[in-house]
Image (cartoon, grey):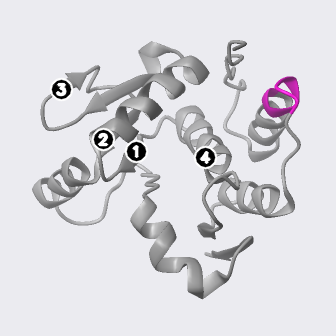
């Protein structure tokens, strides 16, 4: 299996530069974004909130990767969450390949690797505990992607569609 190319951070947090860097990375892998992915990424980079309701395997992770990139260049923290450790661990290694191990951390009930990293992979339980402990609205620009969010919103947007709001 060929190695995933590293996603290089653009020089600034300008939305056009971030989009161009992300698109170049995707193209380098031979990927073409689906319209719902492209729309969601553009909306995220414009500062809108996005609910991406698509079936498993339709590319939500590519949108999440763009959100992590945007958070990184804006010097914010982003989170990838999943309900079980096996999925979190898998995504941790994948994001290390994409962004570099120094940019990615892992927090589960029994493991902590690079907890000060700007991209954190953690179980939903750990993220809930962080939110409860810190309280209030997060100020770090969190991006949270969970399977439960996808399931809960599927009927609202319909398969293969993106709902965006400011």
The 10 Å Cα crowd at callout 4, few under 14, some 14 to 19, many 20 or more, is some
Tag 3 residue: 111
159 or 107: nearer the viewer: 159
Going from N to C along the chain, the mark reached first, 1 or 2, is 1
Q: Write the residue at 53% across / 26% down.
A: 94
Measure how far apart labels 1 and 2 are at the Cα level: 7 Å
Crowd rating for badge 3 (residues with CA inside 10 Å; few <14, some 14–19, many 20+): few
Tell me the residue that label 2 is attached to: 122
Looking at the rendered image, the quarter that the C terminus falls into is: bottom right
Horizontal side of residue 62 vs 116, given as left or right: right
Magenta residues?
25-30
**Sequence-wise first label, 3 or 4:** 4
Q: How packed is label 2: few (under 14 Cα within 10 Å), some, or many (20 or more)?
A: many
Give the secondary structure at mark 2: strand
- Whether the magenta-drawn stretch holds residue 27 is answered as yes
Q: Which residue is mark 1?
A: 79
First in sequence: mark 3 or mark 2?
Answer: 3
Q: CA distance from mark 4 to mark 1?
A: 12 Å
Q: Residue at x 72, y 12 (%)?
A: 2
Q: Which residue is mark 4?
A: 61
**Front disc: 4 or 1:** 4
Q: Nearer the viewer, mark 1 or mark 3?
A: 3
Label pair 3/2, CB-CB below 8 angstroms: no
Q: Nearer the viewer, residue 105 or 61?
A: 61
The foreground one among 79 and 123 is 123
Residue nearest the observer in this picture, 2 or 65: 2
């Amino acid at each position: 299996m060929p190695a995933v190319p590293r996603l290089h951070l653009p020089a600034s947090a300008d939305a056009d530069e971030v989009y161009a860097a992300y698109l170049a990375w995707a193209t380098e892998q031979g990927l073409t974004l689906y319209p719902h992915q492209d729309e969601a990424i553009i909306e995220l980079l414009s500062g809108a909130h996005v609910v991406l309701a698509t079936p498993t395997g339709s590319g939500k992770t590519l949108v999440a990767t763009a959100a992590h990139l945007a958070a990184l260049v804006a010097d914010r923290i982003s989170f990838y969450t999943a309900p079980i450790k096996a999925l979190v661990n898998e995504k941790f290694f994948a994001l290390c390949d994409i962004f570099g191990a120094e940019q990615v951390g892992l927090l589960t009930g029994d493991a902590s690797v690079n907890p000060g990293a700007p991209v954190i992979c953690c179980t939903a339980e750990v993220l809930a505990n962080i939110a409860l402990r810190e309280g209030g609205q997060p100020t770090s620009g969190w991006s949270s992607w969970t399977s439960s969010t996808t399931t809960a919103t599927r009927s609202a947007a319909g398969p293969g569609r993106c709902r965006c709001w400011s």
